Image: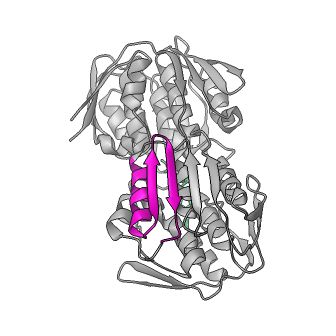
């Protein structure tokens, strides 16, 4: 089993260039099946989740070629509408293929993704919306059978601005007859990137980034080239790596606006942050300040995907901080592991109370999910002594060469196979 060994205490300095966003490129790769066209996607991160999506596209019959940070997909030869169960199990977000495949073939069979490490994660909103667009959906024996002779544009009111449901509806509605309006849509930047890819291919979508998205159905999509947006969560994670080590790191190739909620909280924690075009310099303070309250929220609120990393930082603050996780049911598994490192954290349902300690001490820990794994590595950077983080595969789902990049910034870190 691969694990990370980190010896804490080194101050991180230098520059890091941020890769393309996992959560943008996954729905875009799903979207490549819609048009029986060719898509060339640049700035694609080398991650396990992206590999799984490539394998799904291949299993559906698409031609897929990968070169460095570029993926080319020709979806003309697509000849299968069943998404392999083992791959859905490996990557829950393969559920966004439902909308894309319905749009392409009027039919898709996918296994029920079920819950995951961060909570039960139902897909009721996805299914309700697809039914409203005209799909017939049957769920039996753990599979979802979707069929639609014709998808018809309609008005969809989401009960919650779900990122995945918003993407699934956009993908299903691209070629639907007439106009689809999504109200209370998710406003995440990754939705804007999906709109941008689809519109370059000839779709007519407006409003991504706001809570009302309007999709006018088109007959076909053309060949398209797209450059994936930078990963705001990877950027935020390196910002905390600098903050927690009293470091001075410049995070380059980012869209600063996407990081405003994280910047505000890091400033409250005492960091000095300077911006310059597409980069930010983060100078970590001698002593982290506690933060009265962080509430995770849909964008533009504080991202749930940064909650675990922030908890690592606040565990060595000079006082008590509160984190309220409002997006997911069960996203505090890292707290128990941080406690093994000497952190003082109490969980009350969806609220964590973090009483800052003077120092963390290295310990054997295990990543329970992707961001929780990143949190433990960050804690290890600041801890006295050696920290082991097991279950490296979680971290590889969302961070490209994490330990190599951290080592280049000065961390004492290695991966053991
Ligand atoms: N929800 C429902 N019913 C639905 C859909 C969602 O109850 O039909 C609930 C979820 O259970 C959750 C909340 O709504 O409690 C938000 O879920 P959302 O659908 O917005 O999340 P997602 O699309 O499943 C994406 C990211 C997550 C990120 C969330 C929130 C991808 C591939 N995943 O998930 O990323 O945390 O949005 O921003 O885009 C990660 O990268 O580590 C990660 C988990």
Q: Is residue 386 magenta?
A: no
At 38% from the left and 48% from the top, the residue drawn is 48
Query: Residue placed at 52% from the left, 62% from the top?
Result: 74
Occupied quadrant, residue 344: top left
Is 251 on the left or on the right of 87, as rendered?
A: right
Q: How far across and down, in percent of the image, does residue 411 sit?
A: 38, 18
Q: Is residue 296 above or below residue 252?
A: below
Towards the viewer: 80 or 388: 80
Identify the residue at horizontal 49%, vertical 66% (top origin): 95
97 displayed left or right of 167:
left
Q: Position of residue 355 (x, y in %)?
A: 46, 28
The answer to which image quadrant residue 139 occupies is bottom left
Range shown magenta: 48-77
* Towards the viewer: 256 or 39: 39
Residue 75 forms part of the magenta stretch: yes
Q: Is residue 33 left or right of residue 367?
A: right
- The residue closer to the viewer here, 356 or 170, is 170
Q: How is the image coloured?
A: one colour
Residue 317 seen in the current view: no
Figure quadrant of the C terminus: top left
């Amino acid at each position: 089993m691969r694990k990370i060994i980190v010896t804490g205490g080194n101050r991180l300095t230098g520059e890091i260039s941020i890769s393309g966003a996992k959560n943008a490129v996954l729905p875009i790769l799903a979207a490549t099946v819609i048009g029986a066209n060719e898509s060339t996607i640049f700035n694609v991160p080398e991650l396990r989740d992206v590999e799984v999506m490539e394998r799904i596209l291949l299993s559906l019959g698409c031609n897929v070629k990968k070169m460095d940070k570029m993926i080319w997909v020709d979806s003309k030869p697509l000849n299968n509408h069943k998404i392999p169960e083992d791959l859905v199990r490996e990557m829950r977000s393969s559920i966004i293929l439902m909308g894309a495949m319905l749009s392409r073939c009027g039919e898709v069979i996918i296994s029920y993704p079920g819950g995951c490490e961060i909570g039960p994660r139902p897909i009721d909103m996805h299914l309700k919306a697809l039914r409203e667009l005209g799909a017939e959906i049957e769920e039996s024996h753990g599979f979802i059978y979707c069929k639609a002779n014709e998808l018809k544009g309609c008005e969809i009111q989401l009960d919650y601005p779900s990122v995945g449901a918003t993407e699934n509806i956009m993908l299903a509605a691209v070629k639907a007859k007439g106009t689809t309006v999504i109200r209370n849509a998710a406003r995440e930047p990754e939705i804007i990137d999906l709109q941008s890819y689809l519109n370059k291919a000839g779709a007519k979508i407006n409003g991504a980034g706001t809570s009302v998205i309007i999709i006018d159905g088109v007959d076909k999509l053309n060949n398209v080239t797209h450059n994936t947006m930078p990963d705001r969560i990877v950027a935020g994670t390196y910002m905390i790596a600098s903050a927690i080590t009293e470091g001075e790191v410049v995070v380059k190739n980012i869209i600063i606006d996407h990081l405003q909620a994280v910047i505000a909280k890091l400033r409250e924690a005492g960091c000095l942050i300077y911006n310059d075009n597409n980069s930010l310099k983060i100078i970590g303070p001698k002593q982290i300040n506690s933060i009265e309250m962080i509430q995770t929220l849909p964008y533009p609120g504080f991202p749930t995907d940064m909650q675990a990393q922030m908890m690592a930082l606040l565990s060595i603050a000079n006082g008590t901080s509160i984190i309220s996780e409002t997006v997911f049911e069960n996203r505090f598994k890292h707290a128990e592991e941080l406690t093994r490192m000497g952190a003082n954290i109490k969980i009350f349902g969806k609220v964590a109370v973090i009483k800052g300690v003077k120092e963390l001490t290295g310990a054997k820990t295990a990543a329970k999910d992707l961001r929780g794994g990143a949190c433990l590595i960050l804690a290890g950077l600041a801890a006295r002594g050696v920290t082991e983080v097991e279950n490296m595969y979680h971290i590889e789902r969302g961070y490209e060469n994490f330990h190599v990049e951290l080592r280049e910034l000065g961390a004492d870190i290695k991966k053991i196979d």
